[in-house]
Image (spheres, rainbow, N blue to C red):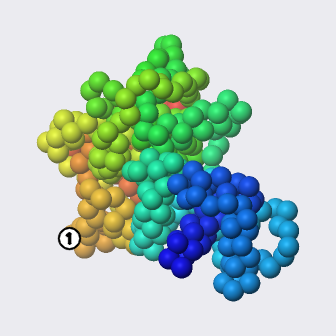
Amino acid sequence: MADRNFRLGSIIRVIARKPGTTLTQLHQELSDAGINITERTLAKDIALLKSEYRLLPDRDRLRSGYVLSGMFTLSDAETFLVMDAIHAFGTRLSDPQAEKMLERLSELLREYPEIMPSQVVPTRTLRQHNIYRNSGAARDVEQGLLHSIRIQKPVTMVYETPRLARPETTDGYPLLMVFHERGWYCITRDMKHKNYYPRRIDRIKSLKLLVNANANESHISDVREAQFLMTCGWGMTFPRNSKELQQSEAEPDIVVRFHSSIAMYILEAVNRHPRGKVVKVKDGSGDVEFRIKLLNAGEFLYWIRGFGAKAWLTAPAALVEKECTEIRRMASRYKL
């Protein structure tokens, strides 16, 4: 009886992981798992699951293979999609239930090393609609990056961006995909100096998996470090390593003052940044201040300019003067 129960449990696990499995495929799966069973005995077990346990549709022939009745199951590929979706729409929004579901799926997949590596990490984060090129080549690059993340192998890529005079060839470990400011990025760690870089997908002109290179043994810790460094910057401008992070800690606070007419909107999101702090100005004006430490304030300044005259820098003095110079240039464009 124990042997039969073990077989039945094994059959259910195979069908749950691979819905649509045929009798022949099921027999092969069980044999590969070290379960010696004849097709005749397997057919009897299938009949038992149909009649007594009612876990399979009670039909003589299942042309599309076996599926579990009354249960929703996912194939291996579908499981990956679900994990990506949960991370995209749940984890990004700090949803505890989504986090829990992601952990449960990860634990499930760890039980089957033939599906994917034992250490499972999410691969996508979603924010906005993609406005950049989405050609067939870009999709191939994206799939190559996702495959590299899952097997934790490095790639070599040709990367082209307007700030470079010519394309650069670089090697590194892809860690995770991030959707930011209407475009997909892949956060990578270089193989020599352990620096982290955001690579926009449509700027990667070619990609090749370094099959013979060692897998990244520190993949999980690298992902966590990259995510932490991203919280220490603004947008896709963040410290590349711990040394740059220490430099940003030594920088003076960047202070922005918001006019009272929009203060209530700023106060609605006092946790808009893990390193930022929103406080009310104690002068009776109703204004609020936002303080933050950043090594590179470029993207942050773009955000501030979006508020027009209702937001202005008050510190540090050097950055205030630099912004004043830029404002004068803007005024000259309008011939004011």
Tell me what residue is drawn at x 54 percent, y 39 percent: 147
From this viewpoint, is residue 76 visible? no
Q: Nearer the viewer, residue 11 or 3?
A: 3
| Image quarter of residue 85 | bottom right
Q: Nearer the viewer, residue 288 or 134?
A: 134
Measured along the vertical axis of the image, is residue 172 above or below residue 110? above
Tell me what residue is drawn at x 58 percent, y 23 percent: 206
Please, which residue is most extreme toward the bottom here?
52
Tell me what residue is drawn at x 47 percent, y 40 percent: 151
| Image quarter of residue 273 | bottom left
Coordinates of residue 249 in the picture (x, y in percent): 17, 45
Measured along the vertical axis of the image, is residue 242 above or below residue 43? above
Please give left or right for residue 328 compared with residue 336 in the image.
Answer: left
Measured along the vertical axis of the image, is residue 143 above or below residue 311? above
Coordinates of residue 302 in the picture (x, y in percent): 44, 44
User: Helix or strand or loop: what does disc 1 sit on?
Assistant: loop
Coordinates of residue 272 in the picture (x, y in percent): 37, 62
Q: Nearer the viewer, residue 35 or 283?
A: 35
Please, which residue is most extreme toward the left here?
250
Please give left or right for residue 75 compared with residue 6 in the image.
Answer: right
Tell me what residue is drawn at x 65 percent, y 65 percent: 15
Name the residue carrying label 1: 282
Q: Nearer the viewer, residue 218 or 187?
A: 218
Please give left or right for residue 180 compared with residue 220 in the image.
Answer: right
**Residue type, mark 1 in image:** Lys
Coordinates of residue 101 in the picture (x, y in percent): 47, 69
Please, which residue is most extreme toward the top here?
166
From this viewpoint, is residue 216 visible? yes
Number of other residues with Cα within 10 Å of mark 1, as a class: few under 14, some 14 to 19, many 20 or more = few
Please give left or right for residue 57 compared with residue 5 in the image.
Answer: right
Measured along the vertical axis of the image, is residue 213 above or below residue 319? above
In which quadrant will I find the N terminus?
bottom right
